[in-house]
Image (cartoon, rainbow, N blue to C red):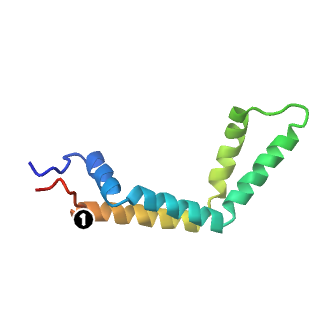
Amino acid sequence: MSGKPENANGRVSMHLDVNNGLERVTELIETRLIESGWKDRVKLACREAITENNQNVPSVDHLIEVITPKARALVPDAVKRELLHEIEMIFSNIEKGGYTTTLDG
């Protein structure tokens, strides 16, 4: 047995674990969103949603319901393209067998 997972989900998970892919993608997203000002715009949208409800303090669930679509819409297209490219590269490396494990013998 080679130690390589047979299904696609297993291969993706193994690649992300072994090559720190998930960590790299997460760092990329966080960095690009901060650089683009997205985080500040989402904070502002939260403040606006809270002040619009000045009579009632909105629940966290209400804020999530209101802010999530706005936050998704505020993600710059360039960040989406870069993330898509990174994910495509991960899949390309997986298809090429570009992941290794210390379990392979």
Q: Quadrant of residue 16?
A: bottom left
The single residue placed furthest to the right in the displayed view is 55
Task: Please count the marks in the image.
Answer: 1
- Asked which quadrant contains residue 76, the reply is bottom right
Front-most of 12 and 77?
Answer: 12
Q: Residue at x 30, y 64 (%)?
A: 92
59 over 22 or under it: above or below? above
Horizontally, residue 90 falls left or right of residue 57, namely: left
Q: Position of residue 95 (x, y in %)?
A: 24, 61
Residue, x 42% and y 65% (percent of image)? 86
> What x and y, as percent, mark residue 15?
30, 56
Horizontal side of residue 11 vs 77, given as left or right: left
Residue 68 in the image: x percent, y percent?
65, 45
Direction front: furthest residue: 102
Secondary element type, mark 1: loop
- Locate residue 45, reporting x and y percent: 77, 50
From this view, report whether residue 100 is shown above or below residue 57: below
The C terminus - image quarter: bottom left
Residue 84 left/right relative to 96:
right
Q: Residue at left 66%, top 57%?
A: 74
| Residue at mark 1 | 98
- Residue at x-position 22% and y-position 57%: 101
Q: Would you identify the image quadrant in which residue 104 lies?
A: bottom left
Instruction: Bin the neighbour count of mark 1 within 10 Å (Cα to Cα): few under 14, some 14-19, many 20 and up.
Output: few
- Choose between 22 and 61: the one closer to the eye: 22
The amino acid pointed to by label 1 is Gly
